[in-house]
Structures are given as structure tokens and as C-alpha cells.
Image (cartoon, rainbow, N blue to C red):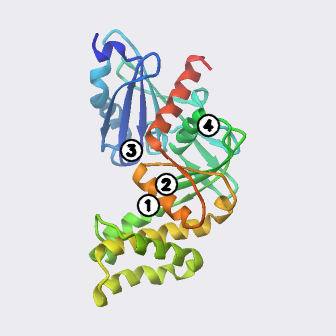
Amino acid sequence: MSIADRVAWIAVDWGTSNLRIWAMDAGNDLLAERSSDQGMGGLDPSQFEGVLLGLIEEFLLRDRVTPVICCGMVGAKQGWVEADYVAVPNAPPNGDAATRAKSDDLRIDVWILPGMKQVAQPDVMRGEETQVAGFLRDQPEFDGVLVMPGTHSKWAHISAGEIVSFQTFMTGEMYALLARQSVLKHSVAVTGWDDAAFETAIGEAISRPESVAAKLFGLRAASLVSEQSNEAARARLSGLLIGLELAATRPYWLGQNLAIVGAPEVGAVYAKALALQGLQAQVIDAQPMTRAGLIAAYETMKGTQ
């Protein structure tokens, strides 16, 4: 029996920059996964179906309709079809709130999960709410704060199975812009690290956040007039920006139960920053959590929950 014969449905995480799919069997076990750099940000709405088919064609059968459950920026205003937002406080949205996307290929039935919005102190998320759903599927009694680092880091207060409130920080995007498009690009390495430089920068940003703008230019100056390495500058830039984030999120993490859901490498950096403040946080890989959240949505749509 081929993989295509065993595929019951397809889970999709479609962000701004990347697309990831998981082919699932009837028992929600993973059969295969594929990824692409054809994220929402580079596509016209008319292109989504073709891009998806190019990645999942091998899993489709001519005489079968395969459900495709998507989360992420594919449901944004500029995406395939706009999926609504669910307002907090609320449980992460499940399959009952999904929006069907029009497709011309009769072999697929595409559904997009909604994001979440916060009206007071306006904020939105698309994709992270599915990570929360997956996390709560594994740890339904969790009460505390989930940190989801990335291009736009999210801090979500979780209680009684609901996202009570959340806050977004453009830390990852700011790092990319400063390291690759500002004057700092001449001083910041692409790889390499310096723990001491990172730890010092974290402390400086948390204790004096108002000084960070000056300290950022200091990264360039130090490479010109002192012996600061580009690797130390990379760690220091990361420390200054994450330190700013921690300074602003103090009400979220002070005295709270914490967990970090993200790419393992980035999650470890955030865990180290929090440890410097005397806080311990488990680091959980975001990909399995996203897939678990999509499974929960699929099960709801099937009526098995």
C-alpha cells in the first residue's frame, strides 16, 4: 500500500515566509512531511492552490476527497481567504470555527482555522493559537504564561484552558532588520556566539531599557574602535533586544509558571535569558505543538471530540 493510500488528511502550517505540510493517517499518525519557502508573503491569492498542490500532489488520489486543515497567515487578509478572529478571553479556536477556502481541484477540501484578537490593547495572532491548542492538548491543566518566540514573539496568559490575554513583540523582525539592513550589518556575524556578551546585554537592557537605542549604535562603534568580535556583537544585539522584551513583559513573567514553545535553538536562548532572572521555563518544540493543534481541530471537525 502506498503512502497516498494511507493518507486520511493533511495538516498545513502556512506562515508569512514558509509552508510546512504533514500527511496524516486515519489514526492521526504522521506519514510524511514536506516544506517550502513559498510563504504567504510572496503569493497572490490566486497562487495558493497551485503551491499547495505542488507540495501534496503525491498524497492525493483521483477518487478521494482529502481534507486539508490549515493554520497561520494563509488565513490573513492577504492570504488564500480571510479567516475570522476569535476574541480573547477564549479557548484556542477549533475546527468548528474554520473557514472553507475555494479550490478548483476536486480532490481537496481546504479549511483554514481562525486567528485570535485582543480588542483592549489591540493585538492579533495567526498560527500561535494553534500552538497553544496543541500545548493544551498535552497539558490541559497548565496555568501560567506561554512564551512563543519568533519573528513576532507572543506572550500569552493561559488559564482554565483559555487564552486570557496576549502581547506581541517584533523582536525577531527587529533583529533581522538591524543585523542585515542597518549599519550594524558590518559588525554583526551571521553565526557564532559569546555567552558573556549576551548575558551582559540582557542585564543592561532590563535595568536601563531607555539606553538601548544608544547601545545598539555602540555595537558598530565597538567594532571600529575596540576589539569586539562580530560574534560578540551578534550575541550582544540579541541580548539587548530580548532584554527589552523581558523588561516590557515583566508583569507576564514575574511570579508566573512559564513554558516556551518555539524553535529549539531560539527557545534555548529565551530560556537562558529568563534563567538570568532566576526563572526556569521548559522549552517545547513548536512544530509538534502546531501539528497537535491541527489534529485537535481535525478531530473536532470529524465530531470525535
Q: Secondary structure at mark 4?
A: loop
Q: Residue at x 49, y 56 (%)?
A: 152
Neighbours of disc 3 within 10 Å: few (<14), some (14-19), many (20+) = many
Quick check: marks 2 and 3 in contact, CB under 8 Å?
no
Q: Residue 40 — which label?
A: 3
The type of residue carrying mark 4 is: Gln
Q: Earlier in the sequence, mark 3 or mark 4?
A: 3
User: Of tags 3 and 4, which is closer to the observer?
Assistant: 4
172 lies above or below 184: above
Rendered image quadrant of residue 97: top right
Q: Which residue is mark 4?
A: 139
79 lies above or below 224: above
Q: Secondary structure at mark 3?
A: helix
Q: Residue at x 40, y 53 (%)?
A: 265
Give the CA separation, mark 3 to mark 4. 31 Å
Q: Secondary structure at mark 1?
A: helix
User: Of tags 4 and 1, which is closer to the observer?
Assistant: 4
Q: Residue 172 — which label?
A: 1
Q: Earlier in the sequence, mark 1 or mark 3?
A: 3
User: Of tags 2 and 1, which is closer to the observer?
Assistant: 2
